[in-house]
């Protein structure tokens, strides 16, 4: 499977085209829009989320609630477009009209793609860079991820996320009985934190940063249960599934680090305190007594829960901006200020779910016969039984 996205932050719409889904998979608008709504929530979101009410429109590839096997196209309209029709329109402008546009950006923001993108593509108006590099694009990545999550759920695989840290406020590792409990508790939290003891401290840290015209980052964790053993490959570096997950997490705007299982903590331990002992019983087949490696060995799933964490830096758009250099005059100025969040870590957890779900679903579709959903489900069930008997 693969997907492409298109669209600018203040353009008319965002679009994703998904290729490779099995035919006959049940899915509805509600499956997608529920995930889009989750992305818009979270303490610390900016005014843009008060303007947009993201809803996906299915324009192809799904008929009467089932995929056709052809490309699926999803469109999310930007409600704010009506205020940007001339500034972001596709038609050419006269010299007079161009002079009237007061939103040309020549002052790149530190921490953003503005300067590097302007140099790479030769843009003298850096709006041409920031409109596409904006995290608004993750809207349709979440839409694509919603489709992947639906496929995984139908196959008995559940994906959840929660926030471990915001602005130096650390939560205790979640203690839960089922992944559904984890989902329920975090959905009720405005910072997507399972630990109620630090929830208010996280909110206070976000509010303090906002009052200072600053921003804060944090750490999110994605947990996946139900993946069968052996998805991925040890044979080639580019087919290692944990590597794909790491790349997916790092592709999210403002993410600067990723770890799986113990992650960097493994560097501080003896091997005997890192690797997971293998056990077997008649009911479950092979399993690990611990899960320090986060569900992966040799680039393949072990059948244990997948544990992936990502580090999000503070958002670089600051209401008390850092110094920058005007690309036209070369004079030192304070960087441009764009409407932004003071903290998007809770929303980023939803995006992390989406990109992880996509990579897992794509790996399954690649590994098992998948032209038809029923065929894929049958092969998955058969494979699970085969694994038990190995």
Image: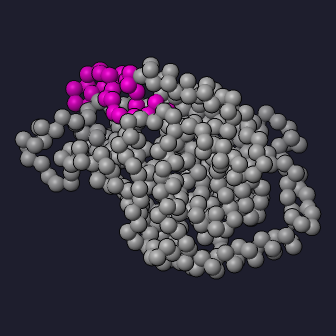
Q: Residue at x 52, y 48 (%)?
A: 38
Instruction: Looking at the picture, tell me which residue is in the foreground, 307 or 330.
Output: 307
For the residue pair 45 and 324, the one nearer the viewer reads as: 45
Asked whether, in this view, residue 361 is left or right of residue 58, the answer is right
Check the image and report above or below for 275 versus 147: above
Position of the C terminus, as image quadrant, is: bottom right
Relative placement, left or right, of 46 versus 274 is left
The prevailing secondary structure element of the residues shown in magenta is loop
Q: Residue at x 45, y 73 (%)?
A: 62
Q: Is residue 221 visible?
A: no
Name above or below for residue 272 compared with residue 142.
Answer: above
Residue 310 in the image: x percent, y percent?
61, 41
> What sort of colour scheme is used for the picture?
one colour
Q: Residue at x 33, y 51 (%)?
A: 78
Q: Is residue 390 magenta?
A: no
Q: Where's residue 340, x and y in %?
A: 39, 34
Q: Nearer the viewer, residue 138 or 233?
A: 138
- Residue 338 magenta-highlighted: yes
In-image side of 312 versus 139 (left or right): right
Is residue 155 in sight in this rendering? yes
Magenta stretch? 317-343
- Residue 202 vertical position relative to residue 365 in the rendered view, above or below: above
Please give the name of the residue rendered at 61% of the width and 70% of the height, measured from the top-left corner: 365
Label total for image: 0
> x, y (%) of residue 195?
69, 34
Q: Position of residue 374 (x, y in %)?
A: 63, 79
Q: Nearer the viewer, residue 69 or 37?
A: 37
Q: Quadrant of residue 113?
A: top left
The part of the image, by quadrant, that contains residue 358 is bottom right
């Amino acid at each position: 499977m693969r997907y492409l996205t298109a669209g600018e932050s203040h353009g008319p719409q965002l679009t994703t085209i998904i290729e490779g889904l099995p035919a006959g998979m049940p899915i509805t608008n509600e499956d997608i829009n529920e995930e889009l709504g989750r992305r818009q929530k979270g303490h610390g979101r900016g005014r843009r989320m008060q303007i947009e009410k993201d809803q996906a429109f299915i324009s192809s590839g799904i008929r009467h609630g089932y995929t056709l096997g052809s490309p699926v196209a999803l469109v999310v309209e930007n409600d704010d477009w009506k205020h940007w029709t001339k500034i972001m329109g596709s038609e050419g402008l006269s010299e007079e009209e161009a002079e009237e546009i007061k939103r040309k950006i020549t002052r790149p923001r530190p921490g953003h793609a503005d300067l590097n993108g302007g140099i790479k593509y030769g843009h003298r108006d850096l709006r041409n860079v920031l409109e596409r590099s904006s995290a608004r694009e993750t809207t349709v990545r979440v839409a694509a991820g919603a489709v992947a999550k639906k496929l995984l759920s139908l196959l008995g695989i559940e994906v959840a996320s929660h926030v471990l840290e915001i602005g130096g406020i650390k939560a205790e590792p979640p203690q839960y009985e089922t992944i559904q409990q984890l989902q329920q508790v975090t959905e009720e939290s405005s910072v997507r934190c399972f630990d109620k003891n630090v929830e208010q401290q996280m909110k206070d840290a976000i509010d303090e940063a906002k009052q200072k015209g600053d921003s804060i980052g944090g750490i999110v964790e994605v947990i996946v249960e139900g993946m069968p053993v052996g998805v991925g490959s040890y044979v080639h570096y580019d087919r290692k599934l944990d590597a794909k997950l790491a790349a997916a997490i790092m592709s999210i705007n403002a993410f600067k680090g990723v770890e799986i299982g113990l992650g960097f903590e493994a560097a501080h331990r003896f091997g005997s305190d890192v690797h997971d002992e293998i056990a077997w019983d008649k009911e479950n087949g092979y399993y690990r007594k611990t899960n320090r490696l986060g569900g992966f060995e040799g680039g393949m799933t072990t059948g244990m829960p997948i544990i992936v964490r990502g580090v999000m830096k503070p958002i670089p758009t600051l209401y008390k901006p850092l110094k920058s250099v005007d690309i036209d005059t070369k004079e030192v100025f304070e960087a441009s200020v764009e409407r932004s969040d003071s903290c998007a870590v809770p929303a980023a957890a939803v995006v992390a779910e989406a990109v992880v779900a996509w990579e897992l679903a794509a790996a399954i579709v690649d590994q098992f016969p998948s032209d038809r959903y029923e065929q894929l489900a049958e092969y998955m069930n058969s494979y699970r039984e085969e694994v038990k008997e190995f």
